[in-house]
Amino acid sequence: MKEIYLDNNATTRVDERVFEEMRPYFCELYGNPSSMHFFGGQVQKKVDEARSRVAALLGALPDEIVFTACGTESDNAAIRSALEVFPEKRHIITSRVEHPAVLTQCRNLTKRGYRVTELNVDGNGQLDLKELEAALDDDTVIVSLMYANNETGVIFPIEEAAKMVKAKGALFHTDAVQAVGKIPLNMAESAIDLLSLSGHKLHAPKGVGVLYVRRGTPFRPLLVGGHQERGRRAGTENTASIIAMGKACELAHLHMPEEAGRVREMRDRLERELTALIPNTRINGGGTNRLPNTLSIAMEFVEGEGILLLLSEKGICASSGSACTSGSLEPSHVLRAMGVPFTCAHGSIRFSLSRFTTDAEIDAVIKELPPIISRLRQMSPFGREFLNK
Amino acid sequence: MWDYTDKVKEHFLNPRNVGEITDADAVGEVGSLACGDALKLFIKLDEKKERIVDARFQTFGCGSAIASSSALTEMVKGKTLDEALQISNQEIADFLGGLPEEKMHCSVMGQEALEVAIAKYRGVEAPKHGHDHVETEGEIVCKCFGLTDIFLKKVISSNKLHTAEQVTHFTKAGGACGGCIPKIKELIAEVMGEEKKAAPERPTKLTNLKKMQLIQETLENEIRPQLWADGGDLELIDIDGANVQVAFRKACAGCASSGNTAKFVEQKLREMVSPDITVQEVQG
Ligand code: FES
């Protein structure tokens, strides 16, 4: 059975070209970039090249790029740094639909006396900037809002938010893990101070991330020790992965317009066909700006895990917005924050596409999913009167 | 992805007895959409109204909810109502070759639906269950899932649960906002206390065999759950007379205070088994 992988917001396949680029840096060019000799020097050059490639994708300067281990580390480092730089300020703003890397951290900080405002989202998963404006005060140290949501793909008006926050004198951080490589960003024209990204969401391997730190932004490192990354992140560089990250960013930069268009067309076709073939569905976040690759579709009266298991029998990998798959018992915090009714939330499935997704794979989902849903609905005690009509 | 047994997968992919029985003798319904799982169970009795000849179900829920429902309908067929009532949620899980602990609440749901169906048929008051989300007997402990203290205590005691986390896996209580977890811990302590009182006095003179059994039971039921709660564990290596050799695992292995832990184990064993016990930590 050939697998059809439509769970790219969870992680992506490493691009062969990326892998080829990193391969020599394990057994041949394994020098430590911090070493003074030529053997380390050649690795250092390659790390610098990677830094420039990441910077080019973000419209940033190379010295604004700090390599980290993952998106979570970048998120943690950004927020922790802000708190250390401005110890007298005690208010943090974020949103209810953030990734746990931000949300859990902020919630933990309340135990240390920080005041945390979690902004609401509307039924489409969209932010209300007026709420942000009202929440900002002189005590606000940092605002952390995601660029695009991992479950629904909803894109927040980050530039407007960043401007508003800067005007109030607070720092602005965005978790752009899902956005980078899928939609264009340009730090040169942005008000964002800090931005997180993660390699494995854009066809680089797992275990490498980046924190963008705007020049002039006061910064305190999370990891201290050696002088790597100009003192902003100690620890020997994960060189092969950093080099891979550079290549992945270069590829994203080169191909984004064409790829995003192609992926969006496939996503839209999937959405159109599924909503036509399966009654009682809704698109989570369908009424606002979304990433081109993400489709979160809610199907009433069925539960996500059953759908995933049956899809998996057909070789199709997707993800569920529901409780049972994750070990937590409630529907995802994102869908709940959006007020998605329980009839739908438990039966929400996320398809996330990538540059490797093909039309034939989309065809297969369109063919396989509708009978799975009707089979599970036949089994379900709910909505039968309604569906049998 | 969950590590489901082949039997769970089989019953999920090819569930037995899906559907309704239009002239059912008994119908039991538990769960709700909000809760994320629900089960409607239909039972048909033979002419003498003695034995169950047919059982069917409708389930909204995850893979193990569907598999548990399927298993339940297979298990009750041919049984009298009283025999069916004896089926425990653990037996449903065993029938399937086991369920991940996080999914045990699915088997609990099956047992509940059965109880409700039979009570209704007999015209007695249906037992109140957590999954019902209606006014229930006792005091609501978990607001998110509407579960009462009486229900929780029953599940704690019949499944010998020791930690709040286990209670969440079996009932969902504590799985959402977590506000009820302190109360759940109190209930566990209460149940443990009641059981201790009810337990027969420890015999004054233990045979070697009895002693070994008692040591094992105490380790399993009293000591290990407490270590699990802190991410640790231990393994019984040997028992030689009154000398018990254990090896620490997980967080306890290499923990600086494993000496204290060994003391705690010794104390507990002295208290529960015999005052002459010594505990020795070994690498094994
Ligand atoms: S009250 Fe029990 S989980 Fe919220």
Image (cartoon, coloured by chain):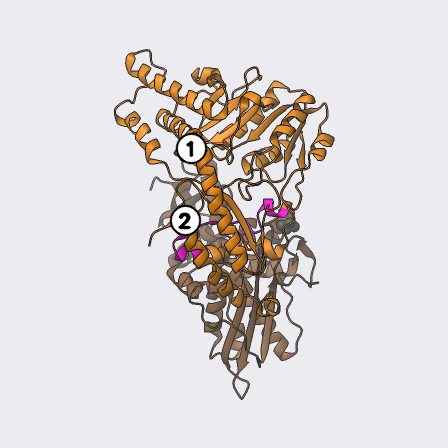
Q: Mark 1: give few (<14), some (14-19) or many (20+) Cα within 10 Å.
A: some
Q: Colour of chain B?
A: brown
Point out the residue furthest to the top here.
A36
For disc 1, the marked residue is A255
Q: Colour of chain A?
A: orange
Q: Mark 2: give few (<14), some (14-19) or many (20+) Cα within 10 Å.
A: some
The label shown at residue B12 is none
| Residue B103 place in picture, x, y as percent | 50, 56
Q: Is residue A27 above or below residue B118?
A: above
Instruction: Please give the range of residues in magenta.
Output: A311-336
Q: Earlier in the sequence, mark 2 or mark 1?
A: 1
Q: Quadrant of the C terminus of chain A?
A: bottom right
| Residue A223 place in picture, x, y as percent | 48, 22
| Residue A179 place in picture, x, y as percent | 51, 34
Q: Secondary structure at mark 2?
A: helix
Task: Report whether mark 2 lies on the same chain as mark 1.
Answer: yes
Q: Secondary structure at mark 1?
A: helix
- Check disc 1 and give the amino acid type: His
Q: Chain of mark 1?
A: A
Quadrant of the rendered image containing residue A275: bottom right
Quadrant of the rendered image containing residue B193: bottom right
Q: Foreground residue, A40 or B257?
A: A40
